[in-house]
Amino acid sequence: MLISLLDKLGQLGQGMQSNIINSDGRERQASLQGRWQQARYVALDLETDGLDPEQHRILAIGWVPLSVPRIALNAADYGVIQSDQPLSQSAVIHQLSEQDIQGGEALAKVLKRLAKSLDGAVLVAHHAGFDWQFLQRAFNQQGVACQPLALMDTLKLEQTRLQRQKDWLEKGELTLAACRQRYGLPPVRQHHALSDAVACAELFLAQAYKIVGAQKTSLKGLLRYSR
Amino acid sequence: MALDLQDMADFLKQTPPFDALDNARFDYALDHAEAVYVNQHNRDEILREGHPTLYVVRSGTYDLNDKHGKFIERLETGDVFGFPALLSGRAITNQIEVLADGILFCWDAATFAYLRRYSEPFERYFMQAQERRLLVEHRGEDSTPDWTERDIGSVISRPLISIGSDTSIQQAAISMSENKVSSLLVVDEGQLRGIITDRDIRNRVVAKGMDYGVAVTAVMTQMPEAVYTRQSLFDALTMMNQANIHHLPVLDDEERPVGMITTTDLMKQQRSEPVFLMNALFKAQSREALVEEAQNIPHYLRTFATRVKDIGMVGRLLASLTDGMTRKLIRLYEHEHGAAPVAYAWMAFGSQAREDQTLSSDQDNGLLLADGIKEGQREYFHKLAEFVCTGLADCGIRLCPGDVMAMNPKWNKTSLEWQQQIKKWVQSPTPDAIMHSMIFFDSRMIAGNQQLYRRHRDAIGKIAQRDIFLGNIGRHIGELNVPLGLFNRLRTKSEKGGDYIDIKTQGVAVINDIVRLYSLIEGLTMPATPARLQALQSHNLLTAKDNQNLLEAWQFLTQLRLSHQLKLQGDSTEPVNSIDPETLSTLQRRQLKAAFSVIKDAQQGVGFKVGRGL
């Protein structure tokens, strides 16, 4: 994700009142009311060639399913999206080459795989609103049905936690790397969709246990920290 | 599908045994991994899920404890655990204590089995790791060692500060204060000549009113004890303790001085118990204070044993602590009763001398007195011996039931008297004589006059080189009972309601006897069995393979015995030197048999080489 432009991203996320996407049906309701550890999560990260879902495209998607406290690395997945269009300046950050992109998979194909895990699960991402806007658009365009239960934003979880301790946040305090460091998680290679997805999954677990501790908390309860 | 999880791949590539997998198996391991976030709240549910799992620590810090909560191992980044349950198929009984939350990578039993089956190094790693505390473990490279196992070279940070031998004392003092150091190496043309410390300047110059313009050679310690960069910090620690010095010059492999290591350097490594315990023993102002500090030793050794991979270090450490206490007691005695009237050497025998002491070892020691001693002067040494021996007993090193102690006049003699005694033993080698002489030939000087001891040790070494005597020892060894019966079956003896094998008398001691005999033949005077075996490599009595086998058998048995003793609770009635083979794993039983068959072969070898009159 384009971390240097977080300020702009912040605006994009505003106005979202609820982080619940679709809680229709008995199963989804049960997940929401049930213990947070029982819910199904998918941690995800996108590489895009810009910040605007209207005009920019997804270059790569990495995701990993999570059943607390386990991260199913063996079920992790990663897809580079095929395109013949030239890359923009964003290549400096995500480090995908034109060859990578040309040799990628069809967007629909990757989305279908993703939908199998993500539909009905809680989407976990660092600045989840941003990823979801891109994804939602892509799902619609490609005619792939996928509705996560809710968005769990590790950036907002961190913001909530930090704002309870102090009222002024320095720039850069909320990057994925800075957040991870706060929990003693080892540094990882950044801006690779799958690495970041796994990094985000680890961060989420660390945050959730820090927030919840030994209390019994529902998914709904935990989601409140991510608004 | 080999996932592009670069961080994990990078990490595992450096983590044994995954680093030894070929590419295909490595990808297989990556593809079949899970990660789990562990903290104090969920640790129980993770381990109690009950599926045996292989774990590798990615981040965080954990203590692995047994089901009674007893500490086994500290786990940090790169450590592997969980495999005993996988290997044995038994339920998981260990628990973890989370000191810092973090991530573990996990693999299920099927993946573990697959990797073991298709990768020999992987399989071997776990076979060895399973016996980690019992088998020879290759030091270094492939895992994070305890700080005491680190190279001395890795902790020398300051550049070498040295002066030439023609430097004046005043210049040396100026150099010390400019460099803010308390000692300097005296070096000429890259060769170490000596060492001078601020204490030398205080004691040998200022206190004596000596001229500051004199060259340092007049007051430096010449040819000081030194260590090499590739030796371990533990080596430095024991040498400082044994020589009672706080500064050690460090040399490279070409004998060139490269720096200095001090007790402060060691303490900086960690707030670590060996140094602090030794320091506390050194600093004790009275017998009472020393005895009180010594009560911590057994507890301390237990935790030390869980941390180091080579449990043989426990024997060395205990010997080193006993040395330190002995010297302290001698100094306390001298403080009260004045300096000794004649030169003497306090000698340790047996396990303390060989540095394979255990918690159940009793004291074996003796005094060597200068030949010119007058009758009236002996009283001083009898009282000294009484003071030291009973002091050691109060410190937990029990009195010798066989009375092999300096407080017994038979073990408190002048050099000439000793030589006569030994000649008598050599000429009429009764079983008793052989036993006593054997104790005597494993000796090490703990305190006193180095020259007196050296000359004496060489003299008695020569006395021992008589064929009849050596032949008798050979025959004695041939009669020892190795507990291996027909078809290589372990022969146990009923004792205290169980079936046991005495691995001390029937194992360790037999190897010690064999190695001692060969050392006597070759005129080697060092006492430790591994050091003797190493020295014997350049002689023809043992083939390289037999030599190696004996060393491994010795290490296996001493470690097995030590870990058995460390497991016993204080009030246990189980024998301390015996083991019921039924309580061992299949692998350990196999190794035990292998060790005894090595001993049996070596025993027969002695018969061929020595029994028939050399």
Image (spheres, coloured by chain):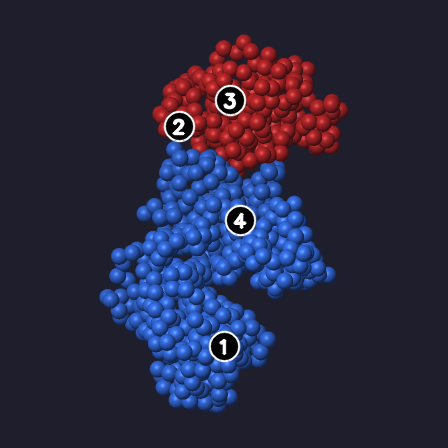
Chain colours: A red, B blue
Label 2 sits on what residue type?
Answer: Gly
Locate residue B281 relative to residue A183 in the image: left or right: left
Dot 2 lies on which element? Answer: loop
Residue at the spot x=30%, y=55% of the render? B569
Dot 1 lies on which element? Answer: helix
Label 4 sits on what residue type?
Answer: Thr
Is residue B289 visible in the rendered image? The answer is: yes
Dot 4 lies on which element? Answer: helix
Distance Cα–Cα, label 2 vs label 3: 15 Å
CB within 8 Å, label 1 to label 4: no
Residue at the spot x=60%, y=53% of the render? B183
Identify the chain of the residue marked 1, using the numbered disc in the image: B
Label 3 sits on what residue type?
Answer: Glu
Tag in front: 2 or 1: 1
Residues tagged by mark 2 and mark 3 found on one chain of the structure: yes
Q: Residue B572: percent from the left, percent from the top?
A: 27, 58
Q: Residue A62: percent from the left, percent from the top?
A: 59, 30
Q: Mark 4 points at which residue?
A: B264
Vertical order, A78 against B519 (above or below): above
Tag in front: 1 or 3: 1
Classify 10 Å Cα crowding around label 1: few (below 14), some (14-19), many (20 and above). many
Q: Mark 3 points at which residue?
A: A158
Locate residue A59 relative to residue A75 in the image: left or right: right
Q: Name the residue under label 2.
A: A213
Q: Mark 1 points at which residue?
A: B457
**Residue nearest the viewer, comparing B580 with A197:** B580
Locate residue A220 relative to residue A113 in the image: left or right: left
Identify the chain of the residue marked 4, using the numbered disc in the image: B
Residues tagged by mark 1 and mark 3 found on one chain of the structure: no
Tag in front: 4 or 3: 4
Question: Which residue of the protein is positioned furthest toward the right in this rendering?
Answer: A86
Residue at the spot x=57%, y=27% of the render? A178
